[in-house]
Amino acid sequence: MNRTSLFYSVLLLLVIILTMGSVTFAREETEELNLMPVPKQITRGDGLFRLSDSFTIAIQGKKGGARLGKAVTRTLRRLSDRTGIFFSQDFIRPGGNVQDADFIISCNRQGKLILHEDESYQLRITPEKIELSAETDIGILRGLATFNQLLNADEKGYYFPSVEIKDAPRFPWRGLLIDVGRHFMPVEVIKRNLSGMAAVKMNVLHLHLTEDQGFRVECKTFPKLHELGSDGFYYTQEQIKDIISYAADRGIRVMPEFDMPGHATSWFVGYPELSSAPGRKYTIARKWGIKDPTMDPTREETYVFLDKFFAEMTALFPDRYIHIGGDENNGRQWNANPDIQAYMKAHNIPDNHALQRYFNQRILKILQKYNKKMVGWDEIFQPELPKDIVIQSWRGQTALIKAAQKGYQTILSNGYYIDLIQPASYLYLNDPLPKGALLTEKQKKYILGGEATMWGEFVSPETIDSRIWPRTAVIAERLWSPGSIRDVDDMYRRLPVVSLRLEELGLLHEKNYGMMLRRLANSHDITALKTLVDVLEPVKGYKRGSLREYTSYSPLTRVVDAARPDAVVARHFRELVNSYLSGNKGTKDEIVSWLNLWKNNHGKLLIVINRSPILKEVEPLSRDLSDLAGVGLQALKFRNEHKKPSEEWIQENLIKIEKAKEPRGETELMIVSAVEKLVESSK
Ligand code: ACM
């Protein structure tokens, strides 16, 4: 063989190897990952990194700081917990021995907890080595969140797939609001939700700290605020510092909200002179809804008070942004107060909007004095406010776009109201920057991101996780991942996996379901109850409060509270029926087996209901589930036998179906539309 043909033979061999390589590559390309949020750029490689007890991690250099060491140690311990592997490595500090390590981490500096901080990272996993690098330690934290989601297993053990990821967020503000004003949430609730947020790369915890129903932070200057306004349920300043430090360890900012001038009844219990009807005696509000009590923007004493108040609070909360609420001021106290009316006349303030604008401008000056930037709900978006305020849009997308067009920074919450129980698909497709939005490139930059809002009327420490998770993970993806990532089916494929990973962090959205059902069943077997509640969802939107009068001390332990948004079994059944009716006969057996399960469930559940009065309210739903399952089975039979049901049969059952759509116990049966489709299709 001469040199030329040797060259060509080697080349040919190389081509064959490479081709084989790419065949392998193609196979692994289709092996599904369960990443949420999906990274900006991901390339699958060959082979995998196998995990063993000799696995070690090292942080290159000392630029990363203490937060990085803690985060990496947490990652190693979690890996150990999930795999049962006894790693020899214990605690990891910056400046480790990089030579022998399997996983090398490096960054250039400690990130600051500020808007627009660099959170990008690169993660490279090969069969031999793992490398994670970033500009900041916060970027490393985001990369570790991805790393945690990549762990996989096969019959040979645990592994990480070969990948190369280059990732950075689409929006710099990715938040979760927790309303601790309406129902107080102990520190542990906040901490476990911060862990969940970090796992899906969210970076702002918005604490809604004051409401008509509660003032939730210790105030040393004006102690009657928390002493008289909270029923004893407030965070001490030490607890606030603990929350802020826990969040900072996870690269999360904490922005406090002190809602004013409305939503402020709890302030007036101790300091009625702040209100616009100061002669009144105030008590903490117990019912929900928009209340009249409102701060008096026309008295200088109000601003003297708020100046001192913000002096203390701006020192307690290190974040640059502070939220002043500004929403839902009904103006009734202003209209009824002759002094306020006289003031407006004397100062050429034509209406309540203008009066609130005046108030906002005064508050803004105070915040500026303390070097803070002001955030408020979209009601505060009025001309004359400087361009460095941030508008949080809750009433509509239009307000968001308009504000950005005018050069205001905005965050979207309209459509991310997770308390309203909409399905994950709805939240997922809601985009702060929808395709075709009439914005220039410069204006687009004003849209900072969004926040999921966990309003507190109907949540307790026991149920709040199930309203936040797993759905907030899809909002996190919308805010982090490229806008082109919008495949709802793929989101629903990944979501159950993500949900269980979140549970590992101590979140109770999965675990408490069983506990609540056991309590509801009064210690009897929960099988039949679970079969029913698996296909129930709480009513959506603002309906729950309209169906029954609730207070801040109403029980949140009924079926409606155990039932979860986006009921997985019901959605699966609806998908089966859709698939069947569009010609996929393969789903029929499973449809039949669900219908049989439900048809026979009522008799079993009735035994439990009769021993547990709290379940009485769902008896009609249970009966409907059985009845409709029977109807569904009949409809399938007609289809199968190519027979047409009588017009009478159809009408009778469509009436039954219509009735079954009505909520009972503030819950809805989520398989009714699927049975309706089966009946319609048998015509
Ligand atoms: C709001 O929901 N009132 C901000």
Image (tube, rainbow, N blue to C red):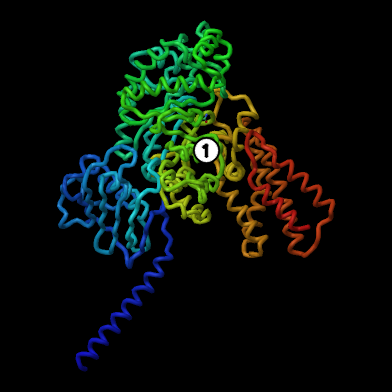
Name, please, the residue furthest toward the top. Answer: 279
Q: Foreground residue, 255 or 105?
A: 255
* Residue 601 percent coordinates (x, y): 65, 46
Instruction: Identify the secondary structure beneath mark 1.
Output: loop
Three-letter code, disc 1: Asn
The N terminus sits in image quarter: bottom left
**Which residue appears at 40% of the width and 16% of the height?**
226
Residue that appears at 31% across and 37% down: 114
Q: Residue 421: tell me if it is visible.
A: yes
Q: For mark 1, does the 10 Å Cα neighbourhood hold few (<14), some (14 to 19), or many (20 or more) residues?
A: many
For the C terminus, the image quarter is: bottom right
The correct choice, above or below, for 569 with respect to 556 in the image is: below
Front residue of 102 and 314: 314
User: Does residue 508 appear left or right of residue 85 in this picture?
Assistant: right
Residue position marked by numbered label 1 in the rendering = 414
Q: 218 or 101, which is in the foreground?
A: 218
Q: Depth check: 141 or 193 in front?
A: 141
Give above or below for 650 relative to 540.
Answer: below
- Percent position (x, y) of residue 126? 28, 63
Q: Position of residue 539 (x, y in %)?
A: 61, 37
